[in-house]
Image (cartoon, grey):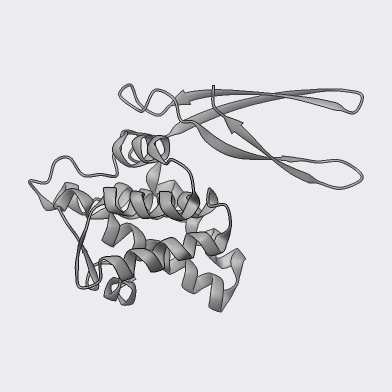
Amino acid sequence: HELAHQWWGDHVTYRTWGDVWLSEGFATFSEQLFLSHFWGEPAAKAHRLAYLNNIFSAPCGQLHVSDTSGSNTLFDGATVYAKGQGVVTMLRYIAPTDSQFFQVLQNYQQTYSFGNASTADLKAIAESVYGFNLDTFFNQWIYGRGFPQYRMTWNQSGSTVFVRLQQTTSCPDSTPHFSTPLELQLHATTGDTIIKVYNTL
């Protein structure tokens, strides 16, 4: 984590205190890159899940810090660190290819080296590399509050499987709807299948 701050915090420093997640979220994300490389993906996944449980302790958490008056909100473990690394992981997940995600990181470091950058600067670079608009992603996950919660039911008729997802929010002033891709794993005697659905409604 501290080694990663040579890039996320020192080489490129966040422009305002509200953007502190650009340092702490990316440094926390870098922990799982280390684990994946040296200890394997199961270790990295276990690490992410531990942070996920931390996020749940702040159901109304907001990643972009609006109250910058004290260290408790600036360096909140559940939001700036845990949710921060989760949002970076999701930014990687929605990338057209994994190499494009790492291209975003490289372009960000090259563009703002030995200077300051904001959340909006990262967004602009990600959009130029990914080739699509990221307004919804940034508005709901970085500037919005909370996270989605799901209840799932399913039924099967012959070889057709019906899945119903009901999304609620983690707190009253959360983002009202999170438009996000979800992976569903279907089990069968012939083998398991993972499908991706887009929860846009």
The front one of 100 and 148 is: 100
The image shows residue 24 at horizontal and vertical percentages of 29, 60
Label total for image: 0
The C terminus: image quadrant = top right
The residue drawn where x is 53% and y is 48% is: 94
The residue drawn where x is 43% and y is 40% is: 133
The image shows residue 119 at horizontal and vertical percentages of 27, 50
- Toward the left, the furthest residue is 69
The residue drawn where x is 56% and y is 61% is: 98
The front one of 152 and 62 is: 62
The residue drawn where x is 35% and y is 61% is: 26
The image quarter containing residue 183 is top right
The N terminus: image quadrant = bottom left
The image quarter containing residue 154 is top right
Q: In this view, does 16 lie above or below 4?
A: above
- Name the side, left or right, on which 33 lies relative to 190: left
- Name the side, left or right, on which 93 lies relative to 193: left
The image shows residue 58 at horizontal and vertical percentages of 32, 39
The front one of 189 and 16 is: 16
- Name the side, left or right, on which 173 lies relative to 10: right
The image shows residue 103 at horizontal and vertical percentages of 46, 65
Q: Is residue 21 above or below residue 172?
A: below
Q: In this view, does 63 lie above or below 151?
A: below
